[in-house]
């Protein structure tokens, strides 16, 4: 039979071990979450299709510095191939995408845009920035 004091020592050691392992898991989780937040705010991607120049264009843009510089890329079997600066490869595409993002934000904040005679100047500007014109 194991004396009570040995059982208490063994139980104490097990609890200390659990605390150490739990703390290590918690610290690893914190590092992983911090790394994920860094990647999500630094390595950005804009991908889609549009007819900004009159013909359909599928694009894949990447930024490796939080959106300061954008690059047109292509995916191959070897991996990501950087085609060049996005504004050089696809002139006007970034401003078109930014305009559409501003339009979406405007509508979320202000509701649908009522096109017509009493149209707000800001709404008209948002539409123009998105590459749309309103005929009077």
Image: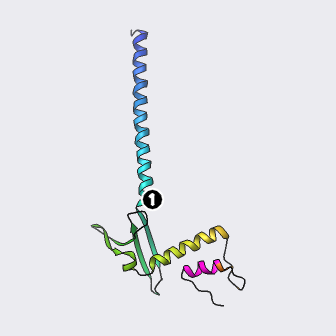
- Magenta residue check for 29: no
Q: Would residue 51 be found to the left or right of residue 73 on screen?
A: right
Q: Residue at x 42, y 34 (%)?
A: 23
Residue lying furthest bottom: 136
Q: Quadrant for residue 118, please give it.
A: bottom right
Q: Which residue is mark 1?
A: 41
Residue lying furthest left: 78
Along the line of sight, the residue nearer the viewer: 127 or 1 = 127
Q: Quadrant for residue 19, please give it.
A: top left
Mark 1 residue element: helix
Residue 53 in percent (x, y) is at 46, 86
Q: Tell me the crowding category of disc 1: few under 14, some 14 to 19, or many 20 or more residues within 10 angstroms, Cα based.
A: few
Residue 20 in percent (x, y) is at 40, 30
- Magenta residue check for 131: yes
Q: Image height check: is 136 above or below 35?
A: below
The C terminus - image quarter: bottom right
Q: Residue at x 45, y 53 (%)?
A: 37
Q: Residue at x 40, y 80 (%)?
A: 90
Q: Would residue 55 be found to the left or right of residue 77 on screen?
A: right
Residue 109 in percent (x, y) is at 64, 67
Residue interval drawn in magenta: 122-136
């Amino acid at each position: 039979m194991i004396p009570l004091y040995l059982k208490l020592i063994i139980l104490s050691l097990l609890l200390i071990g659990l605390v150490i392992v739990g703390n290590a898991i918690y610290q690893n989780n914190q590092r992983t979450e911090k790394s994920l937040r860094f990647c999500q705010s630094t390595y950005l991607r804009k991908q889609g299709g549009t007819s900004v120049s009159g013909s359909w264009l599928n694009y894949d843009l990447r930024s490796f510095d939080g959106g300061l510089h954008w690059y047109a890329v292509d995916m191959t079997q070897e991996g990501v191939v950087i085609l060049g600066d996005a504004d050089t490869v696809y002139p006007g595409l970034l401003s078109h995408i930014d305009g559409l993002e501003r339009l979406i934000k405007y509508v979320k904040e202000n509701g649908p845009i009522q096109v017509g005679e009493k149209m707000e100047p800001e709404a008209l500007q948002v539409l123009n920035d998105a590459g749309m014109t309103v005929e009077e």
